[in-house]
Image: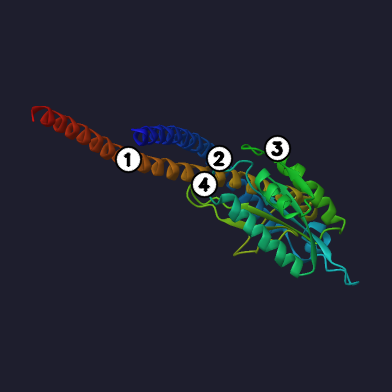
Amino acid sequence: MAKSKALKGRIRSVQNTRKITRTMELVATSKLKRSQDRVVSARPYALALHEVIAGLVTPELSQQFPLLRRPALPAGGGPARAAVILLTSNRGLCGAFNSNLIKEARRRIERLEGEGYTVDLHCIGRKGAGFFRYLGRAIATERQDVGDRPTQEHAGSIIEPLMAEFEAGHLGRVELIYARFESALSAPPTTLAVLPVEPPARGGRLPDYLLKPDAAGILDKLLPLYVRNSLYRGLVETVAGEHGARRTAMKNATDNAGELIENLQRTYNRQRQAQITQEIAEIVGGAAALQG
């Protein structure tokens, strides 16, 4: 009897867990839709910036703008500095989403250090910061205030100090580790070289622009905007990837809880049936003994 009570208690516990995971799945689905809309809205603007810069950049202008130049390693043999911006979530329960981003960050840090860079790590999101603090690695910047609705202001506050350091020659490169949103089921960790800006390749016949002011004046405004927008896209795509991963994880947890409840219910029914059979047998045996 005690074993049957324990089974009933476990069934109730798993049922309550399934209600929670089902609710979290529905919430993640709702947030995923809004995040997808932000990703879709950001892409045409980024593409337009990309095309305009491709039409303006020339080899001469590449040497004129610090954001396009490639700083060389110091001649004295000392390492140059590089910055790695790692985007992760503030919350868990999203499968391997954060661990995959962290693995990519560790791989890039090791590679940059192998190339002679001293790497400054900037963690946006609690999970990434918590992991590297556990390893004892110094974190140059830690932000947990971006949340589910990143804005251009968030992106600017993160990247503008790094742009200033890059332009001053204190940083050799800046890389962004983010989740590239492909679908609700796929958001692979991706490394994007933010600085120096890679001049987009000129493809095919370019439009014949009438420029006012000249190309240099336009690039002076567009290049910082392009860098900020690159980080903004990384933020919105990572948020969408997080919600997609959480929805998948919670759906799997809900399905597994349902299967576990079925197995426990069958076990409980078998035990209950065996108990009833035993009680009937005892009654029949007792009646037979009285008649004898």
Q: Are marks 4 and 2 in contact (CB under 8 Å)?
A: no
Q: Residue at x 72, y 48 (%)?
A: 123
The amino acid pointed to by label 3 is Asp
Residue closest to the eye, 133 or 3: 3
> Which label lies toward us, 2 or 1?
1
* First in sequence: mark 4 vs mark 3: 3
Residue lying farthest to the left in this orientation: 292
The amino acid marked with disc number 1 is Glu
Type of the residue with mark 4? Ala
Tell me the mark number nearer the camera, choosing from 4 and 1: 1
Measured in 3D between alpha carbons, the distance from the residue under mark 4 to the one under mark 3, in whole angstroms, is 21 Å
Quadrant including the N terminus:
top left
| Residue picked out by circle 2 | 35
Q: Secondary structure at mark 2?
A: helix
Q: Nearer the viewer, mark 4 or mark 2?
A: 4
Distance from disc 3 to disc 2, alpha carbons, whole Å, reads 17 Å
Residue 107 point in image, percent of width and height: 66, 63
Residue on which the image places disc 3: 145
Question: Can you identify the residue that label 1 sits on?
Answer: 262
Q: Is residue 157 left or right of residue 204?
A: right
Task: Give the residue displayed 73% in from the left and 47% down from the top.
Answer: 225
Q: CA distance from mark 4 to mark 1?
A: 26 Å
The Cα–Cα distance between marks 4 and 2, rounded to whole angstroms, is: 13 Å
Quote the CA–CA distance across marks 2 and 1. 35 Å
Query: Dot 3: what SS?
Result: loop
What amino acid type should be assigned to the residue bearing mark 2?
Ser
